[in-house]
Amino acid sequence: MAAAGSGNEEGQAERLVALVESIRGWATELGFQGTVIAALDLSAAGPRLLEWLEQGHHGELDYMARHAELRLDPARLVPGAVRSISVRMDYWPAGAREARDVLGDRSLAYVSRYALGRDYHKVVRGRLAKLAERIQSVAGPHGCRVFADSAPVMEVELAASAGLGWRGKHTLLIDRANGSWFFLGEILTDLPLPVDPPTGAYCGSCTACLTACPTGAIVAPYRLDARRCISYLTIELKGSIPEPLRAPIGNRVYGCDDCQLCCPWNRHAKPSAEDAFAVRHGLDRASLVELFGWSAATFEERMAGSAIRRIGHERWLRNLAVGLGNAPTTPEVIEALRQRADDPSALVREHVGWALARHGVAGAVVGEVR
């Protein structure tokens, strides 16, 4: 006869399996397209993270080094946590102008597809909070916390360890059936839920993302040098964009998608049904000149609720000035740049001077600002 304790353990295990199935169903109802349960063992990721930091590939992202130990021990964020409920939410905006068409027209401003709609941090985190409430209502009070790119959590590592996809050579997560156009989020919990197994890795011998990167930021498979990455340069970098990297940036004024646009697995990607990620303010087809004319007040008004608002008007103008420097020479482009040649911001003035010089305008002042 089995001991009473073993029967209780079997019953608990069955209840946890049933709870996971309920969690997957609730997550689907809340707009997530995939849900897995991951253990919090990140010991294998530690040496890679520390080597990346030692090589300085994080650039000015000081928080990456400052919170390295915290990243490798999620239980320090949620005491007692043993699992991550990792979710995926697709974001490819339905109806957006073809990305390659925008990149091919240097008079237009290219905004990364994830930023064309509303700020994903708020959307994903809000849905995860509702999911956590549903779990609490069934499982009872327990330790948990929701995250959406909002704390030092190694979300790609966690999601990959439980089969939500595999880490591609561009360092992003890829799913065989859905590509990589999705956001990740997680709930760290102390519930000992059964863990999902990892999937295989299917990049094979493909190196499309390495060769497609305009600035050569993917320095080796699975190794990104943030200091050369256009997303870092146009979003995270606070000062002057290094001059040798400005021409390769082209018309990318907020982020970059080239490594995903070339990925063969993204032929399977499906447009998002989320209204929150639909294009706002014509950002999928706006001209550089038009956006460069926005005042600070207009920027604040139109970027309210957008991830773009975080960089502020000054860096927005800096990025657009680089785009205008790479645009075809037209009277409209020259006039737009001249209008901001005496901008109050030294950062903007310096990039405007560089852009005017690119168009052969005499007297343009070029000098890097630190």
Image: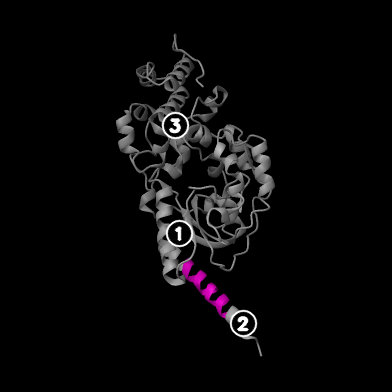
> For this rendering, which residue is in front, 211 or 219?
219
| Residue found 48% across the figure and 30% down from its top | 238
- Per the rendering, the mark at residue 32 is 1
| SS label for mark 1 | loop
The residue sitting at the bottom extreme is 1
Main secondary structure of the magenta stretch: helix
Q: Looking at numbered disc 2 in the image, what kind of residue is underneath it?
A: Gly
Quarter-wise, where is residue 314 in the image? top left
Comparing marks 3 and 2, which lies closer to the viewer? 2
- Looking at the rendering, the stretch of residues picked out in magenta corresponds to 11-24
Q: Looking at numbered disc 1 in the image, what kind of residue is underneath it?
A: Phe
Contact, CB < 8 Å: mark 2 with mark 1? no
| Residue denoted by label 2 | 5
Q: Is residue 194 above or below residue 145?
A: below
- Per the rendering, the mark at residue 105 is 3
Disc 2/disc 1 C-alpha distance (Å)? 37 Å
Q: Looking at numbered disc 3 in the image, what kind of residue is underneath it?
A: Asp
Q: Which of marks 2 and 3 precedes in the sequence? A: 2
Disc 1/disc 3 C-alpha distance (Å)? 34 Å
Contact, CB < 8 Å: mark 1 with mark 3? no
